[in-house]
Image (cartoon, rainbow, N blue to C red):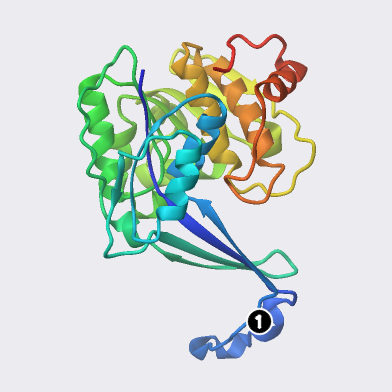
C-alpha cells in the first residue's frame, strides 16, 4: 500500500510584536505606508501542508510519499523527516531557489501581517509514479503548486486511485474550471465551512451539486467537530476530540486530514475515518507549530476511546 501526499513544504518564521499594529498605521496615509516593527521573538518552524500531513501520518505509523518541491535550504527539514523514516524520493530539490517561506508577525491583539515567498513551490513536482494501484493506494492533493493541484487529480482518477482533494489556501488562484475538474471523481473533498462556501461561490454550484461530483464532503467546523456527508444521502456530525489544552490551532486541519487518510488506508468507511481525524487534530492543538506534537499509540487509543468507544484498528 502506498499513500501519496502532494502539497507545499515551507518554513514558517513566526514573530511577535508586543505593541498594536493599529497604533503605528495612519489611516489617512495608507497610500504611502512605510512602517517598521521591532519584534520581540522569532521562531522558525517546519511547515507546509504536505509536510504537516506526512508528520502526523508518521506518528500514526504510516510512511507516505511526499510529492512536492523544496529548495537549497531544505537539508535540516529533510533530516527531520528522515528521522521519522519518511521517504524523501518524492521531493524535488532545486538549488537555485529557497524552500517556501512564510513570515508571520502577530501583535498583542492577535492581528497578523504575513508575507509569503513561494520559492520552490512555484516548481511542479517531478516524481515518477512507477505503479499506481486502485486496490491498495490512496492519495491526498493538498494546497501547493497549482500545476500539481490540477494535474494530479486527473492522474489519480485515470489510475482509479481514490484521492482526497483539499484546495485550502490556494482557492483564490484556482479557477472554477480547475476546482470542478479536480473535485469531479474524487473520493472526498475536505474543507472548512468557509472554504466550502468559497468553492460554491467560485463555481456557482450548491453544496449538494458539489456532493454530486464527489463521494464525500467533509466540512470541518472547529470546536464543533466535522460534518461528513455522503453522496448516498448520509450525514454524520463527528464531534471534536478534546485536547488537554488549546495552544495553537495552526496545523490542526492538516493533522485532521492525516487521521482521515490513516483510517481510509485501513479500510474504514469515511465517517469512521473522520473519527481518527478528530483525535489526530486534537494533539496538534496542544503545541505551537505544525510539526511539534507527538503521541504514543497508547495515548492516541485512550483519547479515541474516551470519545468514540473501542478503536476499530490498531496503530501500526
- Residue drawn at (58%, 47%) of the image: 290
In the rendering, at what x and y percent does residue 270 appear?
A: 51, 17
Q: Residue 71's x, y, as percent? A: 34, 58
Check the picture and name the quadrant holding the C terminus.
Answer: top right
Other-residue count near label 1 (Cα within 10 Å), few / some / many at <14 / 14–19 / ≥20: few
Per the image, the residue denoted by label 1 is: 38
The quadrant holding residue 205 is: top left
Residue 94 lies, with reference to residue 228, above or below; the image says below
* SS class, disc 1: loop
* Residue under the image location 59 percent in, 89 percent down: 28
Q: Is residue 75 left or right of residue 219?
A: left
Q: Residue furthest right?
A: 244
- Residue at 23%, 32% (x, y): give it: 154
Residue 55 rendering spot, x and y as whole percentages: 52, 38
Q: Can residue 231 be seen in this view?
A: yes
Question: Which quarter of the rendered picture does the N terminus lie within?
Answer: top left
Image quadrant where residue 123 sits: bottom left
Amino acid at each position: 500500500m502506498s499513500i501519496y501526499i502532494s502539497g507545499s513544504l515551507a518554513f514558517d518564521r513566526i514573530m511577535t510584536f508586543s505593541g498594536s499594529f493599529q497604533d503605528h498605521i495612519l489611516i489617512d496615509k495608507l497610500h504611502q505606508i512605510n512602517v517598521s516593527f521591532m519584534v520581540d521573538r522569532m521562531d522558525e518552524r517546519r511547515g507546509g501542508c504536505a509536510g504537516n500531513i506526512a508528520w502526523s501520518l508518521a506518528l500514526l505509523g504510516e510512511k507516505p510519499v511526499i510529492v512536492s518541491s523544496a529548495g537549497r535550504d531544505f537539508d535540516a527539514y529533510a533530516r527531520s523527516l528522515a528521522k521519522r523514516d519518511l521517504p524523501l524520493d518524492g521531493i524535488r530539490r532545486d538549488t537555485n531557489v529557497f524552500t517556501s517561506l512564510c513570515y508571520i508577525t502577530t501583535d498583542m491583539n492577535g492581528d497578523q501581517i504575513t508575507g509569503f515567498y513561494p520559492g520552490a513551490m512555484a516548481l511542479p513536482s517531478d516524481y515518477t509514479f512507477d505503479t499506481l494501484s486502485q486496490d491498495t493506494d490512496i492519495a491526498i492533493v493538498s494546497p501547493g503548486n497549482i500545476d500539481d493541484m490540477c494535474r494530479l487529480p486527473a492522474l489519480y482518477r485515470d489510475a482509479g486511485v481514490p484521492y482526497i482533494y483539499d484546495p485550502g489556501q490556494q482557492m483564490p488562484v484556482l479557477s472554477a474550471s480547475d476546482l470542478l475538474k479536480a473535485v469531479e471523481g474524487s473520493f472526498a473533498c475536505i474543507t472548512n465551512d468557509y472554504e466550502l462556501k468559497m468553492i460554491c461561490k467560485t463555481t456557482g454550484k450548491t453544496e449538494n451539486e458539489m456532493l454530486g461530483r464527489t463521494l464525500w464532503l467533509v466540512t470541518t467546523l472547529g470546536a464543533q467537530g466535522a460534518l461528513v456527508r455522503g453522496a448516498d444521502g448520509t450525514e454524520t456530525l463527528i464531534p471534536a476530540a478534546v485536547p488537554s489544552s488549546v495552544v495553537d490551532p495552526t496545523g490542526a486541519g492538516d493533522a485532521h486530514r492525516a487521521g482521515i487518510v490513516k483510517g481510509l488506508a485501513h479500510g474504514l468507511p469515511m465517517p469512521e475515518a473522520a473519527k481518527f481525524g478528530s483525535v489526530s487534530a486534537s494533539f496538534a492543538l496542544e503545541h505551537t507549530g505544525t510539526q511539534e506534537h507527538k503521541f504514543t499509540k497508547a495515548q492516541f487509543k485512550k483519547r479515541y476511546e474516551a470519545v468514540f468507544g473501542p478503536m476499530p484498528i490498531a496503530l501500526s
